Image (cartoon, rainbow, N blue to C red):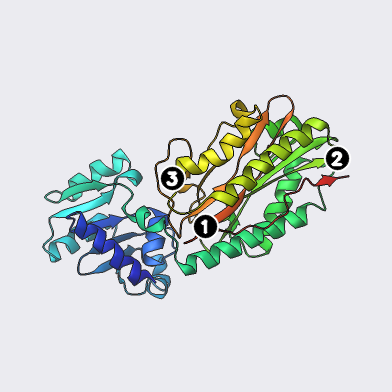
């Protein structure tokens, strides 16, 4: 698997006239090499693939980074990079401009004097945007774990329990069932707080006759899932039912019509137009969805500003919402993969309004 990814990366380098690239960002490093350690750099030339890391990973690196030459670097990894570049008579080095802070760059220019540093943006991410079958299998398992977590937590949501206690139980459940961690800080927002799109769990006690919005995911074998469901504790009012049904209609409409060849903007309109039709357009302020994979937010975007064309193998969320300050809010979210003919939905938790006693 890593060798196939390296081959594609080399093709991109050649297309852009680049001799070599240095990769230090953790997700891109893991994607290209398979190495899961906390520290290291990957150097890819047209001839060789190197993983530079420290003595802590002497055993781990060779086991994970198949096809890579492992270099145990000294106090200054860039000195080793310089030696390798000189060895291959290379005078230009591409680097990930979006992952290098200014202080690092100034240090690099000193250590790598005589080497032309060429900033590039999103080169590895262009490969990551299309998931292969192995990645999709992991993401399906991560989605299934999120579904299982939702089914588990429904038994524990009731009036008088704290949002933080619900969030903690969800995270314990995910980790005890194989997740490395949660994909992000778990959102549990009840009552008026459910109108906060990213209202992470607080000490508020869940009341009665109100929404509880749950947005969470499992970080599993290096990949994220992302699921949102909104339930009612107690008796829903007509307003609860109204906005829930609108969001559900919008989400189902998008899932029915999203297809390859559509732009991110067109996909966004599938939910936005429905919500706007009912007069709640001003209460849906975020995009319809985002890319999902090794990171919880990655390309592509389903938003009013996205011209990205949806292509088979892309994985995205579909998550419209309505948020009414002082009352509450609803979001319904699933993870999907774009296929040759439409989509495959990875998450499967029920979406009819769930009413808990």
Residue 261 location (% of width, % of height): 42, 51
For the residue labelled by badge 2, is the local secondary structure a helix, a strand or a loop? Answer: loop
Q: Quadrant of residue 144?
A: bottom right
Q: Report the Cα–Cα distance between label 2 and label 3.
A: 43 Å
Residue displayed at 68% across by 63% down: 176
Query: Which quadrant of the rendered structure holds the N terminus?
Result: bottom left
Quadrant of res 174: bottom right
Residue at the image point whose x is 75% and y is 56% from the top? 151
Q: Secondary structure at mark 1?
A: loop
Asked if the residue at tag 1 contacts the one at tag 3, i.e. Cβ–Cβ closer than 8 Å, the answer is: no
Numbered disc in front, either 2 or 3: 3
Q: Is residue 111 left or right of residue 330?
A: left
Q: Which residue is mark 1?
A: 342
- Seen from the viewer's position, the closer of residues 280 and 142 is 280
Nearest the viewer among 355 and 96 is 355
- Tell me which numbered mark, 1 or 2, is placed earlier along the sequence: 2
Please give left or right for residue 9 compared with residue 59 in the image: left
Residue 30 sits in which quadrant?
bottom left
Asked if the residue under mark 3 is in contact with the one under mark 2, i.e. CB atoms within 8 Å, the reply is: no
Estimate the x, y position of residue 51 in percent, counting from the top left.
32, 65
Q: Residues within 10 Å of mark 3 (few under 14, many from 20)?
A: many
């Amino acid at each position: 698997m890593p060798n196939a990814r390296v081959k594609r990366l080399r093709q991109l380098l050649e297309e852009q006239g680049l001799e070599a690239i240095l990769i230090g960002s953790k997700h891109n490093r893991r994607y290209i090499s398979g190495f899961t350690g906390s520290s290291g750099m990957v150097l890819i030339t047209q001839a060789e693939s190197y993983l530079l890391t420290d003595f802590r990973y002497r055993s781990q690196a060779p086991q994970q980074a198949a096809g890579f030459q492992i270099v145990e670097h000294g106090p200054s990894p860039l000195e080793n990079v310089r030696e390798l570049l000189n060895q291959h008579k290379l005078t230009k080095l591409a680097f990930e401009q979006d992952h290098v802070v200014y202080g690092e760059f100034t240090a690099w220019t000193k250590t790598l004097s005589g080497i032309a540093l060429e900033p590039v943006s999103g080169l590895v991410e262009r490969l990551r945007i299309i998931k292969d079958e192995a990645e999709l299998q992991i993401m399906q398992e991560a989605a299934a774990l999120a579904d299982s977590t939702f089914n588990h937590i429904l038994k524990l949501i009731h009036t008088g329990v704290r949002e933080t206690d619900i969030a903690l139980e969800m995270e314990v459940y995910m980790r005890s069932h194989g997740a490395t961690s949660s994909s992000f800080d778990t959102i549990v927002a009840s009552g008026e707080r459910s109108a906060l799109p990213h209202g992470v769990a607080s000490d508020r006690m869940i009341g009665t006759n109100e929404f509880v919005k749950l947005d969470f995911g499992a970080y599993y074998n290096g990949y994220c899932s992302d699921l949102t469901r909104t339930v009612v504790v107690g008796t829903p009012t007509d307003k609860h039912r109204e906005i829930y049904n609108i969001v559900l209609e919008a989400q189902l409409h998008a899932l029915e019509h999203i297809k390859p060849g559509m732009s991110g903007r067109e996909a966004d309109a599938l939910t936005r137009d429905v919500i706007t039709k009912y007069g709640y357009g001003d209460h849906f302020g975020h995009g319809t969805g985002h890319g999902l994979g090794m990171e919880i937010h990655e390309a592509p975007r389903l938003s009013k500003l996205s011209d990205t064309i949806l292509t088979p193998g892309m994985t995205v969320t579909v998550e419209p919402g309505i948020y009414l300050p002082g009352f509450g809010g609803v979001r319904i979210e699933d993870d999907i993969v774009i296929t040759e003919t439409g989509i495959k939905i990875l998450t499967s938790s029920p979406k009819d309004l769930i009413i808990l006693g």
